[in-house]
Image (spheres, rainbow, N blue to C red):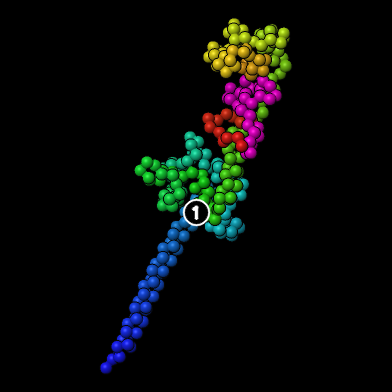
Amino acid sequence: MDDPKTDKAAARRSNRQSHTAASSVKACHAATAALKAEMRTREACESLRFLVFGYHDEDKRTNGAFYDQACGTKVEVMQLHKIWIQMDEDGSGDVEFQEFLSFFSKSKADRLMGMRCVKYLVGSGMCDTGEDKQPMGCRIEDMMRLIWLKAKSTDIEAMMHWFSEAEFKRDRAPTPPLLPKRKRREILENFPMLEEGQAVTFQDLRESGLVEERTIKDLEDSSGGLGVTEGTILEMLCPNGYRALKEAKAASDSDGRPLEYVSNMYFTGWIYKRCTDVEDE
């Protein structure tokens, strides 16, 4: 007769073996899924790097494995900026996926790589979503994280600093020359009361016919009716292509395009005035 104890022990061993086999299968499936996900990430990374930098296989031998890089060089970030501003034409700070695909559609190969990037970004959950919770587009930080897979927050911060520098350098303008003394005298001759140390009244401005009524009303509101100083007169009537005063923060180039002087952690100098700016730090 069979020993009941032996049968029970055999059953337990069989159960353990079945459980171990099932666990091994699950672990194998999980490892396979993780490997596939890693391959998709690397493929999307390589595709975006090629679209932005034009890197080929030989570059990997020179620069190391692209998927091990954490931070780009300043030159690489500047190149990324050139591509980004062409996609983000309205300067909104994000690019819709359709805009992304339209930009990278110079060839069938480029479009396929662009679709690979979009598919990854959509599935990653890192992008902004619309009202229907569906991914709408990506930000420059999203592209940086895909190009430099090992990037940490400090790496993104460093690259965003270079990116902001590039934003200001793109709009850099030549420093406008100081208003010549002759032109300065010609402006002030219209307001002889300044030679006597008196401020120009708003009635004086109206009578001169040199300043629009809307501008005069804005000055009245902002000054509390105290009159207009010599510096303000020079800034208002300064011809295009000059700055009225050494300390002036606003001017226009010779074509009338508005300029402004900025000084922040990214840039110091004159730029063409934008609708939106990075706030001075």
Looking at the picture, how far across and down is residue 15, in whole percent? 34, 78
Q: Residue placed at 66% from the left, 15% from the top?
A: 229
| Circle 1 SS class | helix
Q: Please state the horizontal and vertical placement of residue 262, each as a whole percent of the image.
A: 63, 31
Q: Where is residue 179 in the image (x, y as percent from the top left)?
A: 69, 20
In this view, the residue in front, 23 or 261, is: 23
213, above or below 40, in the image: above
* 124 relative to 237 in the view: left or right: left
Q: Which amino acid does label 1 sit on?
A: Cys
The residue under label 1 is 45
Residues shaded magenta: 240-269
At 64% from the left edge and 10% from the top edge, which residue is drawn? 200
Residue 277 in percent (x, y) is at 56, 33
Tell me the quarter of the picture where residue 221 sits: top right
Q: Looking at the figure, which quarter contains the N terminus?
A: bottom left
Residue 173 seen by the camera: no
Relative placement, left or right, of 93 versus 187 is left
Q: In the image, is 241 to the left or to the right of 125? A: right
- Establish if 232 lies above or below 173: above
- For this orientation, the residue located farthest to the top is 207
The residue lying furthest to the front in this view is 5
